[in-house]
Amino acid sequence: MNLRPDPTFHATPRLAMEAPAETLAFTLMLSPDGTQPDGLAVIDVDPTSKSYGQIVHQVIMPNKGDEFHHFGWNACSSALSPLTGHAFLERRYLIIPGIRSSRIYVIDVKEPLKAKIHKIIEPEEVFAKTGYSRPHTIHCGPEGIYVSTLGGGGPDGTDGPPGIFIMDCETFEILGRYEMDRGKQEKHYDFWWNLPRDYMVSSEWGLPPQFENGLVPEDLLSNKYGHSIHFWNLRERRNVQTIDLGENHQMALEIRPAHDPAKDYGFCGVVVDTTNLQGAIFTWWRKPDGTFDAKKTITIDPQPASADDLPDLLKGFEAVPPLVTDIDLSLDDRFLYVSCWGTGEMHQYDVSDPMNPKLAGKVEIGGIVKKTPHPNGKPFGYGPQMVEISRDGKRVYWTNSLYSTWDDQFYPGDRGAAMVMAHAGENGGLELAEDFWVEFPEGYRTHQIRLEGGDCSTDSFCYPSV
């Protein structure tokens, strides 16, 4: 417990942008076949350091088969909310769930180069206290740690819908389910909120039988994956509205509201449109009467390809879909980054006008067909996936693995782990940094990144910027 709020907590996005640049990043390492334990890599991202771009510490877990996917901080800028009693917490612990094992690790990173396991929450406790399974996304909220799940109860996770549960941010005890009234919500994926306006937005992927053993083509072509976003009264824990984006807009995944809480809009990425293989971004907003609406504002076309160059899953289409698997929004709410995992592209859109985004920059790296190498000449396996933006918006980091079984379907054969960085221009434009390339231990893949002191995908702010 601090005597003053953690200096990495910021009341407004503008103050966060003015904070010192990150010098370390934390990246998940997963063993796709479960023959090794998963781990956490601490990476030097200080360009003045002799170990720049290298792993400087690892925490290897004691169990196998966890399949690390997403993770997050125990506390962040939302602790400064007037509604919280936790303003004096430290941003000290990383909460890492195993999406396949339903086990949760709490890692103490107060001394990053000596990071260590603080606590392990076994799956039996998750099941007993929540009825949920397959924990996925971590967000630090004003009164605790929110954990989204992809599975309900039962062996295959289909005994009841998945949802969100809350953990105590000091003891890490599981407190219980979030939802009081879930309305139409039956599937789950991501979630985020606007704290002062007291609402939350959540999205949908699929139930465990639809993703654990890979994409189910029959379910995709019959539009059985998630295609709705849900709006909640945050404090009442009540679903107040559901918007169906259209059943052809399969897998509505990442939710990214504007960071400035005075702005009443945000974005949702859709993996694929089954009518034309496009990827899409929807902008959602709140209307004067308090209800919400959503509109498709970005489409990304598939690219023609020979069946001989495609994995079995795509041969019949003779095209590569973009496969929008992640999005991230800069802290000034100006640039939206879109990972096109299938075509091997990272797009940068100017979303100053959120209803009329403009493509501002793009880099090509990896891809199912193009297989574009990194500027240093090394092959980049898979495509751009989990993306994190520095607080000042000048550096954009990403990794390359989606989910082990999906990797193997779309990119057969082991393609290796990778983490890269691109420089972002002040007025748009992206350029891959030739001198930043992280080597990972053999047999691992990489997924999400978290930056020292917080990043654009973790903090929720309590006051508007001026």
Image (cartoon, rainbow, N blue to C red):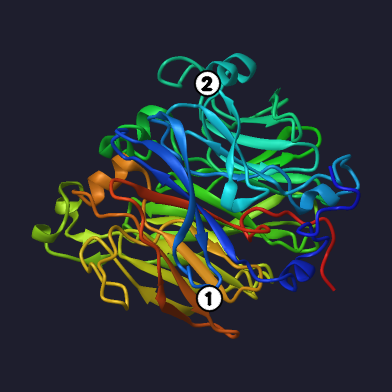
**Number of marks:** 2
Residues packed near mark 1 inside 10 Å, few (<14), some (14 to 19) or many (20 plus): few
* Mark closer to the observer (1, 2): 1
The residue lying at 58 percent from left, 47 percent from top is 114
Residue 280: percent from the left, percent from the top? Answer: 45, 60
| 285 left or right of 117 in image | right
One can see residue 220 in this view: yes
Residue 153 position (above or below residue 306):
above
| 102 left or right of 376 in image | right
**Residue 418 placement: quadrant:** bottom left
Q: Which mark is residue 391?
A: none
Q: Quadrant of the N terminus?
A: top right
Kind of residue at disc 1: Pro
Residue 158: percent from the left, percent from the top? Answer: 45, 21
Front residue of 344/419: it is 419
Front residue of 257/60: it is 60
- Distance from disc 1 to disc 2, alpha carbons, whole Å, reads 40 Å
The residue lying at 51 percent from left, 40 percent from top is 204
Residue 56: percent from the left, percent from the top? Answer: 49, 57
Residues packed near mark 2 inside 10 Å, few (<14), some (14 to 19) or many (20 plus): some
Front residue of 99/207: it is 99
| 293 left or right of 207 in image | right
Label 2 secondary element: helix
According to the picture, the residue beneath numbered tag 1 turns out to be 47
The residue lying at 60 percent from left, 14 percent from top is 128
According to the picture, the residue beneath numbered tag 2 turns out to be 123
